[in-house]
Amino acid sequence: MALDVLRGVALCGILLVNIGPVTGFGRELPPSPATLDDPSGWLQLLVQQRFFPLFSLLFGIGFSLMLESARRRGAPARLVLLRRLLVLLPLGLLHQLVHPGEALTPYAVVGLLVLLPSTWLPRWAVAVGAAVLLPVVVGLTSGGLLLVPGLFLLGSALVRYGVVDRWGTSARGPAVLLVLFAAVAAPALVQQAGTVAQSGFSTSSAVAGLALAGVYATAVLLLLRTRARRALEVVFAPLGRMALTNYLVATPLVLLAGRALDWRAGEPWAQLFAVAAGVLVLQWVVSTLWLRRYPQGPLEHLWRTATWWQAQPLRRPAAPTTSAT
């Protein structure tokens, strides 16, 4: 359930980032640098490139969990994963037509080129690969899509070392990581705030993005050990369990909103955020109702069917009935 909650949280942040570019918000305005005097600067500081790393990490985790599941079932594990990635690729390419810069296409490509071959490597080599790739990419570039291979490998290593299985057993690990991530994020955010106009094009921006993603993830894991657990599961788990469906469906929804409201000249930011909230509420309602009858979302069902190359039950199995005799 923790993974579903984290996916739901990441999905919300990604929509906040994507809704502006997808709808062409402010496209007809003259270019101007982001500042902390308007919401665009705060988006750069707290949201932009903060949830994409988390989403990428979770993809790597999900990939390795699927590998373990296939091995337990006695299925040809790498063939199962190959089909999973090959199905994702055309979905991403179709999505690119309406949302250039979407994540599914690079996820499928990097999965085929990096994640799948990594299944032949010992777990220590996967961990070393992540430990080398991430700082090199941060040091030499501004991050972005180039972080995906390292994040995929990191997610895979977390599964193969059993870290994901131990998330719910102790608060010590997430608490220590939260402090460490916060210690890195704070100075990086201060530096980025001083040059917010260069967000996304600097090392400090990339460092702040990874560190703040870690802060968000570990904070959620800690909150899941408190009384807030039930609320977090109710709000975010349905979105996360249908992450593929919701990610793809959000694009036509915000495109329709952008066309109806015509944001090219830059409407009030409150309107943009209201539409994003409306889309998320609608998706939460639909996801919650759908999952009461079905074990997974419609696109997740098709993806799973293609992955295993056999029909999967769409509806939940009926609960066994007992009768007194």
Image (spheres, rainbow, N blue to C red):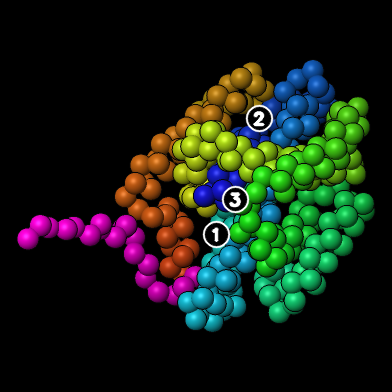
For image coordinates 78% across by 31% down, the residue present is 45
Name the disc covering residue 270, or none.
Answer: none
Residue 221 % position (x, y):
63, 43
Q: Earlier in the sequence, mark 1 or mark 2?
A: 2
Q: Is residue 59 magenta?
A: no
Which residue is most to the left? Answer: 325
Q: Earlier in the sequence, mark 2 or mark 3?
A: 2
Circle 3 packing at 10 Å, graded few (<14), some (14-19), many (20+), is: some
Viewer-closest of 96 and 235: 235
Circle 2 packing at 10 Å, graded few (<14), some (14-19), many (20+), is: many
Viewer-closest of 98 and 56: 56
Dot 2: element: loop
- Looking at the picture, does residue 222 appear above or below residue 33? below
Q: Amino acid at mark 2?
A: Phe
Q: Which residues are magenta?
A: 307-325
Q: Determine which quarter of the picture holds residue 197.
A: top right
Which residue is the site of mark 3? 168
Whole-number angstrom distance, CA of label 2 to CA of label 3: 41 Å
Q: Main secondary structure of the magenta part?
A: loop
Circle 1 packing at 10 Å, graded few (<14), some (14-19), many (20+), is: some
* Residue 198 relative to residue 239: left or right: right
Dot 3: element: loop
Residue 74 % position (x, y):
49, 81
* Residue 207 relative to residue 213: left or right: right
Dot 1: element: helix
Residue 88 % position (x, y):
56, 63
Name the disc covering residue 25, or none.
Answer: 2
Whole-number angstrom distance, CA of label 1 to CA of label 3: 33 Å
Name the disc covering residue 91, or none.
Answer: 1
Q: In front of the other: label 1 or label 2? A: 1
For image coordinates 89% across by 40% down, the residue present is 204
